[in-house]
């Protein structure tokens, strides 16, 4: 569905992604792992048009998207949940979710999707009118995911959704990711938490210094000390 080939991204004179090739099959969950600074966020920013690649191709449903403006990626159905959640703290939960629908004009659809968000995330319902900044980290992550879903993505890019959450909340996040996938959403999951990646993804790719250093079954990662030691520093 999302087919990335020979992607290269350069900041100034620094090559941040080199010759990155992998694909995200329709209906799958694919994990992209790697230590701090390995290029994971840059990868997602490039897949949503926030960063322009210096070379390479990003095909989505067979159509070349590299070079499109960010809005073009959202309209085709690729939407990112940013690292660190980035909810608007002084706006309400409801307003944050509405912001996810800015590129849409189908008002009845927006209204029914809004109802659906509170079915997917029932814990948010009583907090609808509260400032998003007053919610817990886990609840803010739900707002960030809900905001992305309001754009009606086909492919969701998640940037370290488990970061900074307590273990019990991380386990809820795993359930949420699996539930979204069961609803038909294709997911590219960036994580540093290998347990989360192994619990949800079929395939995993490890980025090291902007290059794919390992690709394979995600389930095998947790008991592959060589992989973990070499590429993730554990
Ligand atoms: N806007 C930017 N300008 C210059 N360098 C950047 C910028 N954003 C990230 N970098 C650098 O690119 C590399 C990859 O960063 P990033 O994609 O954020 O990695 P990760 O998400 O894996 O931690 C790092 O060396 C980082 O310092
Ligand atoms: Mg990052």
Image (tube, rainbow, N blue to C red):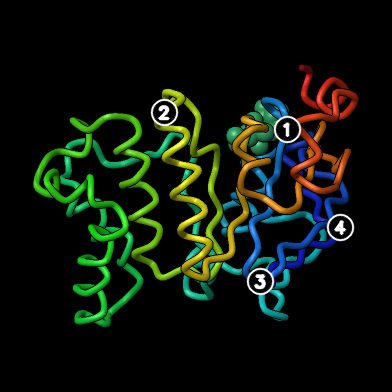
* Helix, strand or loop at mark 4: strand
134 relative position to 163: left or right:
left
- Mark toward the viewer: 2 or 3: 2
Dot 1: few (<14), some (14–19), or many (≥20) neighbours within 10 Å? Answer: many
* Picture coordinates of residue 79, whole percent (x, y): 49, 60
- Tag on residue 34? 1
- Tag on residue 56? none
- Mark toward the viewer: 1 or 2: 2
Q: Earlier in the sequence, mark 4 or mark 1?
A: 4
Residue with the mark numbered 2: 168
* Picture coordinates of residue 180, whole percent (x, y): 47, 60
- Mark toward the viewer: 4 or 1: 1
- CA distance for labels 4 and 2: 39 Å
Query: Under 8 Å from ligand 1: the CB of mark 1?
Result: yes
214 relative position to 94: left or right:
right
What quarter of the picture does the N terminus occupy?
bottom right
Residue with the mark numbered 4: 6
């Amino acid at each position: 569905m999302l087919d990335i080939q020979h992607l290269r991204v350069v900041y100034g004179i620094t090559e941040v992604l080199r010759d990155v090739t992998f694909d995200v099959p329709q209906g799958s969950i694919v994990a992209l792992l790697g230590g701090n600074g390995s290029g994971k966020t840059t990868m997602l920013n490039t897949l949503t048009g926030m960063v322009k690649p210096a070379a390479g191709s990003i095909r989505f449903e067979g159509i070349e998207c590299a070079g499109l403006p960010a809005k073009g990626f959202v309209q085709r159905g690729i939407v990112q949940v940013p690292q660190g959640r980035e909810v608007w703290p002084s706006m309400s939960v409801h307003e944050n979710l509405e912001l996810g629908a800015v590129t849409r004009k189908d008002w009845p659809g927006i209204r029914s999707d809004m109802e659906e968000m509170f079915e997917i995330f029932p814990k948010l319902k009583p907090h609808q009118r509260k400032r998003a900044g007053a919610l817990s980290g886990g609840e803010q992550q739900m707002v960030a995911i809900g905001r992305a879903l309001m754009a009606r993505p086909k492919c969701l890019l998640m940037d370290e959704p488990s970061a900074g959450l307590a273990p019990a909340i991380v386990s809820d996040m795993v359930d949420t990711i699996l539930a979204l996938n069961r609803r038909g959403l294709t997911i590219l999951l960036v994580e540093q938490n290998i347990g989360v990646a192994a619990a949800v993804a079929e395939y995993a790719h490890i980025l090291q210094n902007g290059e794919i250093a390992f690709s394979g079954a995600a389930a095998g990662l947790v008991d592959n000390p060589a992989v973990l030691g070499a590429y993730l520093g554990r």
